[in-house]
Structures are given as C-alpha cells and as structure tokens.
Image (cartoon, grey):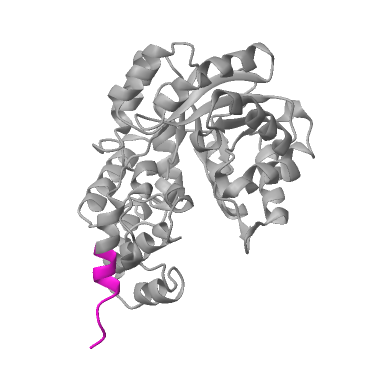
Amino acid sequence: MDRIQKNFGFGFMRLPMAGEEVDIPQTTKMVDAFLEAGFNYFDTAHGYLQGKSERALKTCLTSRYPREKYILTNKLTANFFQTEEDIRPFFESQLEACGVDYFDFYLMHAQGAGNYPHFQECHAYEIAQELKAEGKVRHVGISFHDSAEMLEKILTDHPEVEVVQIQFNYLDYEDPAVQSRRCYEVCRKYGKPVIVMEPVKGGNLVNLPEEARAVLDALHGGSPASYAIRFAAGFPGMLMVLSGMSTLEQVEDNLAFMKDFQPLNETERAAVEKVQAIFHSKNLIPCTACRYCTDGCPQHIAIPDIFAARNAKELHKDWNADYYYHNVCTAPGRRASDCLQCGKCEKVCPQHLPIRELLQEAAGVFEKPQA
C-alpha cells in the first residue's frame, strides 16, 4: 500500500460514453489529468459497463503508462464464476482485459449474506491468497454491501482480509439500510483500512434540491461534490475515497480540492448536517444508478432512469419529468408497470431498495390514464 500517493481514486464505473461505447478520447484526457496531478489509484470490475470498463483501462491507462505509475484494483464478482474451477480462468481473463500482469488490490466483490456462501463454497478467499503468494495480487480485500453484523462475521472468518471497501457518505451515515457508520466502526475495530465508494451517492449529493444547494453555496467555497468527498475522506483510517467521474470537468474539480486535502471544518460540517435534514424531509428514492439491477431484469426496464424521473418529479413538480419518463427512459414493454415482480433486482441492490414497490409507485405517478 506504500505506492498509494494520495487518498483519492478514480472509479472506472461511470465513464463518459459515446453512444454504447466508452468515449476513449475524453477518458484518456481524464486519466492524463489525474496522473499529472499526482494521483495514481484506479478501480474497476468486470461487470462495470458490461466489460467495457476493463478494456477502457487498457486503452487509456495500462497501454500508455509504465506499471509503476499506477495502482489498479479489480474484483471477483459472484455471477462470473459457478464453481471453484472457474475462478482462476476468470481472473486470468481480467488480467488480459486490463493489460497487466498483476493487480495491486483484488477484492471479493459486493460481499453480503446473499453471495458470501457462494464465495465460501468455492474457496474464493483461499484462491485469492494463492494468487497473492504467486505475485499476481498484491493485496486481498472485500467490497461490502450489507449489515455491520455480516461484515463482522466475514472479518472474523477471514482475518487475512487486508482492506474493506464500503459505501460511505453523509447521507448514508446513519441510514439503517446502508449502515455506513456502523460498518466503518467494524472496520476500525478490526484494524482494516477503508476504501470509500459512493461518496457522492451516485451524483445525488451533487445534484441537490434547490434549498440544499443554497446551504452549501452560502459557504462561498467549493462544489457540492467537494463537501461530500471531503466529509468521507476526513475520517481516520480512510485509505482511499473513490469517485466515479464521467467528465473532465469533474476530474478537474475533484483534483482541485483533493490535491491539498483538508477535512471539513465546524462550519462546513454544520452545513452538511442541514443538507442531510433537507434530504430526509424529501420523498426521494436513494438510488445511486449503479445499474446492478438492470443486468438481470427480464423486461430490460431502465430502473435507475425511472427512479431519476420520479425524484425529478418530486423535486420540481413540472412536466419535464413526465416527458423524460415517456420519451427517454421507457419503451413499449419496458415501463414501470411492465415489472414482472420477479425480485431479481432487489437481490442485487446495494441500497436494499424495495424496487418492485417503488416501480409500482412510479407507474401510478407517470402512467395515469389520459383524461
């Protein structure tokens, strides 16, 4: 971990897109700016952008810079291996896709009560340790989406885990579903460095309600993203805070306040607490648009887009959200009311959202019979 230069990382999950493909020219500029500013940590997973994230890393980063210039994290995801024998071939395919001989960090992905037994049955943790002994992995860790009790069980079962990646932001800090604070405290109890994901909650803490934005603007300081990321980075034991940046402007903004990182002061923390209260007073769906839910949806419903339209309707009370719902994020057979209620989406949702119920509510809002 001594090669980590700063505590801010580039998540390759929400890259700029040109149609269905990654916008390589813009992503290359983003990578260059990130490295030139003295940062070197990159994070990916095979499922991000349906495999395009890994390939974009090879094109924009690993084929252009010497291996010692960057730190690369990848993950072992449950739905890409069925048996113990599948793990090594999958891992080797990840190395090839990324264009590297080893990963600095290799994480057991999205650990929780749902998929942890599968990792145990397939001896995934043990195989990761073998890969480390062979020099193909430098550090083994987990990314985690579940209760603090489940995290404690995993760290008890596997004390060899070196780092834990958790969702952590000021909106989820006391959330009973995400349990950011409680999971962080478990990491501290077991002496595990923390990698933060979703510090801006998928953009929710950037695209603020008007009254919340006004609270932060009154500080006459940084962007909404700056307060969210600095909140997360200011806690002891935070090894890395990731941001899934999708424009060069986002990269430049984040680098500006993370180059010489300063934790939130008392005035800024008080403002953040006001923003928390405003969010909690709204009837908003806390979706981060990770799109884990869409991969297995038999109806191919754009669930995060529908939830974004629903939140926009709640915030702005105008016709724009209706237009977006009917003309952009749905199609025949792919409306909220077309949900089959199979529940596949809810099994993989990191936010533990009642997606089926929320889709029914969205259908009631947007699909009312025309008068």
Relative image position of residue 233 (x, y in whole percent): 44, 32
Image vertical order of residue 353 relative to residue 366, above or below: above
Image vertical order of residue 208 relative to residue 231, above or below: below
Residue 38 among magenta residues: no
Left or right of 55 in this view: 289: left
| Quadrant position of the N terminus in the picture | top right
Q: Quadrant of residue 177?
A: top left
Image vertical order of residue 217 relative to residue 321, above or below: above
Q: Magenta span covers which residues? A: 361-371
> Is any atom of residue 285 visible in this view?
no
| Nearer the observer, 330 or 286 | 330
Residue 366 among magenta residues: yes
Residue name at image x 22 percent, y 48 percent:
277
Q: Quadrant of residue 337?
A: bottom left
Q: Residue furthest bottom?
A: 371
| Quadrant position of the C terminus in the picture | bottom left
Residue name at image x 37 percent, y 48 percent:
344
> Is any atom of residue 324 visible in this view?
yes
Residue name at image x 59 percent, y 54 percent:
247
Q: Quadrant of residue 187?
A: top left
Relative image position of residue 272 (x, y in whole percent): 31, 44
Residue name at image x 48 percent, y 16 percent:
161
Relative image position of residue 305 (x, y in whole percent): 42, 62
Relative image position of residue 110 (x, y in whole percent): 44, 33
Left or right of 95 in this view: 253: left
| Nearer the observer, 354 or 44 | 354
Label total for image: 0
| Nearer the observer, 291 or 189 | 291
